[in-house]
Image: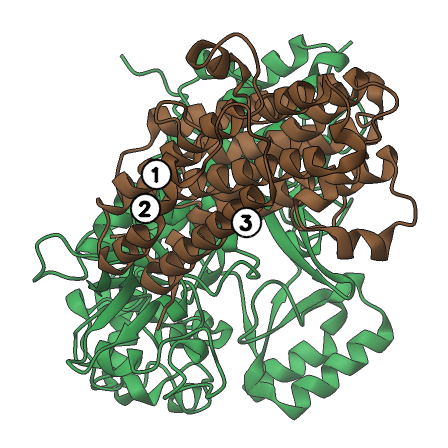
Chain colours: A brown, B green
Amino acid sequence: MILSRVAERIYWAARYLQRVESSARIVNAYTNLLMDLPREVNISWFNLVTLNNGEEEYDTRYKVRDERNVVKFTLVDDTNASSMLGSLSQVRENFRTTRDVVPENAWEMINELSSFAHESISNGGLNRAKRDEFLTQVINQCQMIQGYVASTMSHDAIWHIWRIGRAIERADMTTRLLEAGASILLDRSVSGQIQTPSIIWGNVLRSSSADHAYRRAVSSRVEGKEVPNFLLFNDLFPRSVNFCLREVEKSVKKLPKQRKIMETFSELAPLMESSVLQINAGADLDESFLLYINKLQIQLANLHQSFVETWFSLD
Amino acid sequence: MGINWKNYSNKNFYDELISPSGNPRLPAKQLASYLQSLDNDEVQRRQHLADAAIKDMGISFTVYTEEGNIDRSWPFDIIPRTISAKQWRITEKGLVQRLEALNLFINDLYHDQKIIKDGVVPRHILEQSVNFRKECVGVSPPHGVWAHICGTDLVRDGDGEFYVLEDNLRVPSGVSYMLENRSIMKRVLPELFDNDRILPVNHYCENLFETLSSLAPDVESPVIVVLTPGIYNSAYFEHAFLAQQMGVELVEGSDLTVAKNGCVYMKTIGGLSKVDVIYRRIDDMFLDPTVFHKDSVLGVPGLMKAWQKGNVALANAPGAGVADDKVVYAYVPQIIKYYLDQDPILPNVETFLCHDEVQRKYVIENIHKLVVKPANESGGYGMLVGPHSTKKDQAAFVELIKKNPRNYIAQPTLALSTAPTLVGGDQPEPRHLDLRPFILQGKKSYVTTGGLTRVAMKKGSLVVNSSQGGGSKDTWIVESEAKL
């Protein structure tokens, strides 16, 4: 049986590892996005900070909201616990304190990734010229660790906790990306541009590495309204909110004391019926979409809270 | 150009690998000629490989400094230390003999105290022992064994013989480094494992598991846990390593609870789950705040009572440290004779007891030649190395001895053996070292093949503790006699 304390650390290790990958992906996608947008469209790098609710922390550290500072804040800032390096050291710390249950090589891999990231950054890995190569490498190494865990870990309680942490983090990140995309489009200064929506949604898809899956599933054209539909409700794509929640549910059912968690799930279920959102072709996204995303995020937080109360608290 | 053994000179001490004439000793023959065949760049490359492997494997220990705790990589030298299998087999027997006698001694102290009544060990030693626990009197742990895991420090003197320097019976550490040293070596000098008959070391964790299991004789497959003080402990790496290798849970005090029925449970995601054996890596005084240090948060309230009732086994048993005392150490030859009616196989280092008037006088007069140690410290702290000390240090120690004679012993400064060590240059230099084998005793006894070799990386230094600038080497027990 798995210790409550160990369960909690594994859960966070999984979340943070996913967060490392997400941070790398988002910065990469943004770097590409800004090259594609017409010059009149004034989308700022600062969206990356807003996306993670980091405005307050950012403003205490930086005056200028430019690319250099935002990239620094998102990737390396150690005052930002959710930065890529911050998350990486959280993974490492959680692995370190659960080394008795984590597959041996996963620990070595995370150490390697950590040395690699630190070295690359001190060698100018954040500059545009090297950034893509550096971040792609980080993403690959995260995938390698995921793959290693998936193919060597017994599917016991620890693995289910790991899977839950990963899925929750993915679902959460997907909602944030959608929120960020929608916010940009609702901004008047942007909405006038004809091509912009498809560029923005294309970027949202790339940020969640969903562009290929989307094209195969939906159509070759990136149509605004279809992207939220796909990323929220698609039941085959591993990073859609719906898919992630099913993953969580499957794993919860394999673990003890599930009643309370399943109750939280039933509160969440109505939000996962695609009819809840009236994103019809032709209609524009409006504020109600943002309200919906907000509700969804609150429910995800409740779900997280129910894990804490059921499994992790020691008393 | 590579290593040239003819230029390696170490005339004043016994060298583990190279004889005074510059020829490799028998167990080191293959090793020395292989190292000689590598050019300097290649030797450097292998050392870097080792350093990188240590970093990736996350082998570290914590150093406490004023600026905070630093997680430092394990300093490792790629030239192994060799010992012939023939000599090791005798040493092994001596170690088992010693621990068996010590366990009989501890058990006696907590029951009838026959050895004191018979006048073999003086009573005042017990009365003034800081590690004697009255809470343990009358308790009978399984197999009568109190110290299940022992780390015994051996040194080789100028005559090439092993001497016992001290017995660590409380929470000895270092075994994980011994095991990791070997896995680094296999990555760094894989070629040598083909030629030489280097005996494997990797049975330790299985034997530890078996030893711990034997402490719950009535349970079919006992639940074992490793109890750690947490990540800030300098040996946390080892605690996690051992738990992982044995496939048992690594727990902290707050993960455990003693229930109303007097049994110990761990808190899991499914509720409470019973624990049968605790391999505890925290000191006696922190085990149970209701009995020992009241403000300790590392331990488990009620744990001592659970142990006294036999509801849970603790390894090592509380109170085992009573024999881990440098004054008791001086009596070990008599202890072996008394309980086993055997002569000790491994000799002690000559030891002067300061509570004895005649010996104390000798110590004070000769303090510049002696090593003075407190009876109950570990980690090489609080000692005086006479020949390396100032007059002022010596005078301070004389005062300490006079104030509390029971607490000090002195030993001659040993001509500790050396081994060739890479310390930056291309050519190895001799550095002093010791050896810590680990001995297990439960239902059966077991000794590690070799042990952890610790090296004083500073020239001329005799202090090998990792907290004070020591490093380590892999230890090879080599079967060098031809076997047909």
Mark toward the viewer: 1 or 2: 1
Circle 2 chain = A
Residue B136 image point, x, y percent: 28, 83
Q: Which residue is mark 1?
A: A273
Q: Which residue is mark 3?
A: A291
Find residue A269 and name its label: 2
Residue B274 image point, x, y percent: 19, 65
Q: Which residue is farthest right?
A: A63
Vertical arrangement, residue B168 with respect to residue A30, above or below: below
The amino acid sitting under disc 2 is Ala
Mark toward the viewer: 3 or 2: 3
Q: CA distance from mark 3 to mark 1?
A: 16 Å
Vertical arrangement, residue B175 with respect to residue B146, above or below: above
Residue A302 occupies quadrant: bottom left
Q: Earlier in the sequence, mark 3 or mark 2?
A: 2
Report if residue A137 is visible in the image.
yes
